[in-house]
């Protein structure tokens, strides 16, 4: 049986997912984890962390037959490649130039597009068809657009919620860190309530406005899928989100693995 480990290396978190392939039928995401991105960790330290994750769910690292990786943090890619070799005894499939994605990239310079954006776009198109917009609430909030024919057209990048919060609190001495929850009212009666209103409803408004503008350029009523750690919380306040898929990136990595396996 094939067991695939999908790894998405982001600026804030690394997401990992284990897909089990039965003798017949579709693959299932049986395990998933999110750990912090640590640029100073060695491959030995990273391998220990991954081994403990597997041990915690009574899985053996020896079960893994294949690994696929996407990364937007270049210095960490060789670390995780060494982890793949040390821990699983095989090199990973790395999403990048020369890898079959099944999605033509209509970007002025395709090499500028983050691997995670292509992965999300592929999964969104597979899930909802086209045209489709994938919104990822991560370190940055990204909007990625796919045509009705499955072409990656480009998108938009906006600061992520936590990124914006950190910048605001660093520069404003009288403001403090708050939990991102729904406030009692849009008009905050306290500093905490005002911050929560601005962050939650403000970002929801950005998403609604950006999607409406993108739909205007696409000339079609594109569907929208959201992913990322805060997708559920922000999407609940949006008008335009059709679906929330917490594991969109991992599913996209699975799809890329399958396309390359079947064509190898």
Image: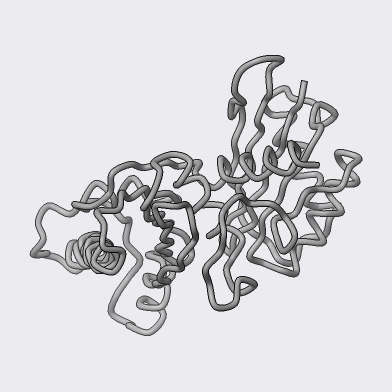
Quadrant position of the N terminus in the picture: top right
Which image quadrant is residue 56 in?
A: top right
Find residue 10 and report its image quarter. bottom right
Residue 220, image x, y percentages? 26, 57
Image position, residue 119 (x, y; %): 57, 52
Q: Residue at x 37, y 52 (%)?
A: 132
Q: How many marks?
A: 0
In the displayed structure, would residue 152 be above or below residue 110? above
- Looking at the picture, tell me which residue is in the foreground, 149 or 175: 149
Q: Position of residue 63 (x, y in %)?
A: 81, 26
Instruction: Pinpoint residue 258: horizontal percent, then vertical percent.
Output: 68, 37
Q: Nearer the viewer, residue 184 or 60?
A: 60
Q: Residue furthest top?
A: 23
Residue 43 found in image quarter: bottom right
Give the position of the C terminus as an image quadrant. Answer: top right
Q: Is residue 6 left or right of residue 240?
A: right
Question: Which residue occupies 37% across, 76% down?
Answer: 169
Q: Can residue 168 be seen by looking at this rendering?
A: yes
**Does residue 169 appear left or right of residue 27 in this picture?**
left
**Residue at the image point whose x is 71% and y is 66% from the top:** 39
- Taking 107 as reference, is 170 left or right? left
Q: Is residue 79 above or below residue 33?
A: below
């Amino acid at each position: 049986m094939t067991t695939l480990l999908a790894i998405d290396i982001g600026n804030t978190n690394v997401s990992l997912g284990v897909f089990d392939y039965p003798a017949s039928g579709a693959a299932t995401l049986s395990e998933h984890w999110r750990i912090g991105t640590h640029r100073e960790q060695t491959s030995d330290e990273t391998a220990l962390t991954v081994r403990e994750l597997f041990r915690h769910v009574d899985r053996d690292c020896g079960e893994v037959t294949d690994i696929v990786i996407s990364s937007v943090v270049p210095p960490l890619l060789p670390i995780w490649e060494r982890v793949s070799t040390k821990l699983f005894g095989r090199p990973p499939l790395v999403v990048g130039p020369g890898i079959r994605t099944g999605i033509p990239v209509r970007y002025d310079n395709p090499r500028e597009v983050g691997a995670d954006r292509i992965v999300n776009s592929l999964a969104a198109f597979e899930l909802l068809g086209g045209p489709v917009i994938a919104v990822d609430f991560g370190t940055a909030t990204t909007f990625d657009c796919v045509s009705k024919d499955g072409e990656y057209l480009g998108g938009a990048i906006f600061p992520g919620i936590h990124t914006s919060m950190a910048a605001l609190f660093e520069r404003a001495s009288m403001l403090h860190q708050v939990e991102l929850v729904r406030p009692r009212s849009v008009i905050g009666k306290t500093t905490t309530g005002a911050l929560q209103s601005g962050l939650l409803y403000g970002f929801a408004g950005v998403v609604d406005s950006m999607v409406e503008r993108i739909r205007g350029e696409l000339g079609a009523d594109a569907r929208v899928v959201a992913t990322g750690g805060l997708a559920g919380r922000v999407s609940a306040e949006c008008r335009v989100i059709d679906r929330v898929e917490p594991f969109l990136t991992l599913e996209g990595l699975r799809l890329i693995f399958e396309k390359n396996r079947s064509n190898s």
